[in-house]
Image: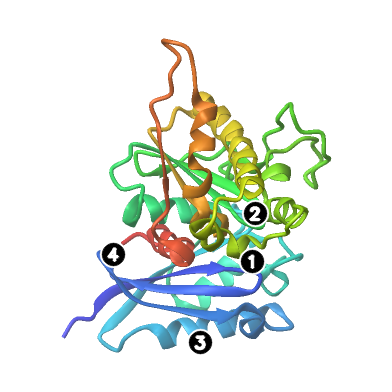
Amino acid sequence: MDKSPVVVGIDLGGTGSRFVVSDGASIISRSVYRSAEIGGDVPMSSVDSLATLIAALIPSSCELVGVGIGASGPLDLDNGVVLNPHTLPWFSDFPLVSLLSNRLAVPVHLENDAATCALGEYRYGAGRGSSRLLVITLGTGAGGSLVVNGKLWNDHLGNHLELGHIPLGFLVEDCYCGLRGCWEMAIAREKLEKRLEELPRPVRLSDVDEMLSREDDQDVCGVLNSYGRDVGRGLEAYCVAFGPDRIVMSGSVSRFLSLFLEAITSQFARTRGFEQKVTVVQGTLEEFGGAIGATVLAGL
């Protein structure tokens, strides 16, 4: 009896890595493992550990035909190398793609994790039906990808667009990328948490939605509105540049989107003839979005 073809999508994270097995139409299984426990002291140890784990996830009635990997950059896509020793030391600075492909005897594809998240939302999530989709991740940093008619819109070298690093005039802080005033410097989760913690009555971000369901705190609402306007300024720049028909917000901060969505869209106001016809919605794939999108890379 012929076995059913399946692919595995992996979202390599600094703390946890997520794995998804898909037959192209549906998700068969999903798992999370600690990255430090998967990675080894030398490249082949990491490769062998990944290969063993992937093989164990494949049902006996199925055959693995491809693997997709999403990883935080920078990446050398031409050579299939992760260049991120800061958060992915176990998988960086060696030809991960070719070594894993040889070990498993199937094609392996590598892409930025924000890009795989965008592919996941486009194929299976809140981006379905969009012809020009912008997916923004709000979390430790800020990133995003553009999907046009189902294809990633990358730069002229084929690399992921670093959408968190658009300099905005109202910001003056130096960014780790070498530019000054990058959007990420204003909207990273740490910045929102700091604003809330510096209030006269400090509030943790994780408690904000519950607290506002019980009382109307003007200080907290002010922080959220200010943050939303900062997010909206960057999104408006991308609307002008890319003309998306839909924006999907993902990442750990996106679960609070309803609390600052109005502030975001307030930045889209334009005079007649210059209006932006774009909707902003929350992503639906949550923590497995990157791994689900990585299955799209593998081709089923």
Q: Crowding at label 1, few (<14), some or many (≥20) Cα neighbours within 10 Å? A: some
Q: CA distance from mark 3 to mark 4?
A: 22 Å
Q: Position of residue 277 (x, y in %)?
A: 38, 26
- Say whether disc 1 or disc 2 marks the residue closer to the N-terminus: 2
- Say whether disc 2 or disc 4 marks the residue closer to the N-terminus: 4
- Is there any visible trace of residue 119 in the rendered image? yes
- Establish if 97 lies above or below 168: below
Q: Crowding at label 4, few (<14), some or many (≥20) Cα neighbours within 10 Å? A: some
Q: Crowding at label 3, few (<14), some or many (≥20) Cα neighbours within 10 Å? A: some
Q: Residue at x 42, y 71 (%)?
A: 106
Q: Label 2: state its secondary structure.
A: strand
Q: Tell us which disc is closer to us: 3 or 4.
A: 4
Per the image, the residue denoted by label 2 is: 76
Q: On the image, which quarter does residue 97 sit in?
A: bottom right
Residue 146 as seen in the image, left or right of residue 163: left
Between 51 and 127, the residue placed more toward the observer is: 127
Per the image, the residue denoted by label 3 is: 52
Give the residue type at disc 1: Pro
Residues at marks 1 and 4 touching, judged by CB atoms closer than 8 Å: no
Give the residue type at disc 2: Asp
Q: Residue at x 55, y 50 (%)?
A: 216
Q: Label 4: state its secondary structure.
A: loop
Q: Crowding at label 2, few (<14), some or many (≥20) Cα neighbours within 10 Å? A: some
Q: CA distance from mark 1 to mark 2?
A: 9 Å
Q: Label 1: state its secondary structure.
A: loop
